[in-house]
Amino acid sequence: MQQDIDLPFCYGENTIYVVGNAKTQQSNPITIQFGQFFIGFVIDRETGMIIQCDVSATLQTTTKFIRSLFIGKSIKDNAEIIKQEIESRYFASSQKAIFVAYKDAQKKFNCIQKGIQIDLS
């Protein structure tokens, strides 16, 4: 018998977790604290819908704002919409890194969909 896990929320069996990585400017607080910028995405395996994400950010407001840019969008089909929203709404030094991390996660997701092994190092 499986023991219940005491978590505030459990993701369904059809979800996967994919992390996208990017570099930010050396003087960026995110780079100083984490070494690089990354976004972790919880994605519906079949639809590609982004269910949740979290970000290597130093401020909670940054994390919440970046979540609002991604949640409810498709990692497969909404690249141009996401890019436009980032460019028109997010004005901080990690702007480019957000899109690069998204594209890295998108690439990994596409490999997973095709059954191609991804490098996890």
Image: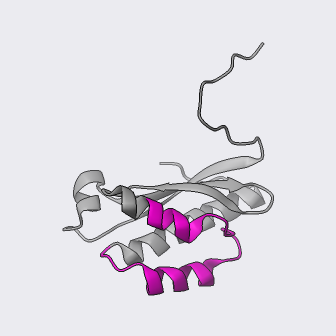
Query: Quadrant location of residue 27?
Result: bottom left
Secondary structure mostly seen in the magenta stretch: helix
Q: How is the image coloured?
A: one colour
Toward the top, the furthest residue is 1
Viewer-nearest residue: 89 or 115 = 89
Q: Residue furthest right?
A: 46
User: In the rendered image of this protein, does residue 104 appear above or below residue 43?
Assistant: below
Residue occupying image coordinates x 76% and y 61%:
114
**Over which residues does the magenta segment extend?**
64-93
Percent x, y of residue 44: 73, 55
61 to the left or right of 99: left
For image coordinates 48% across by 74% down, the residue present is 99
> Residue 82 sits in which quadrant?
bottom right
Q: Residue furthest left?
A: 27
Residue appearing at x 66%, y 37% in the figure = 10
In the rendered image, residue 59, in percent from the top left (x then y), is placed at 32, 57
Q: Residue 101 at what x, y percent from top left?
A: 48, 66
Q: Is residue 116 above or below residue 104?
A: above
67 part of magenta stretch: yes
How many marks can you see? 0
Screen quadrant of the N terminus: top right
Q: Is residue 27 visible?
A: yes
- Which residue is depicted at the point 62% across and 78% down? 79
In the rendered view, tell whether residue 76 sits above or below residue 6. below
Q: Is residue 34 left or right of residue 114?
A: left
| Residue 116 visible in the displayed image | no
Residue 7 coordinates in the image, percent (x, y): 59, 31
Depth check: 36 or 48 in front?
A: 48
Instruction: Look at the image and say whether residue 26 sits in the magenta stretch.
Output: no
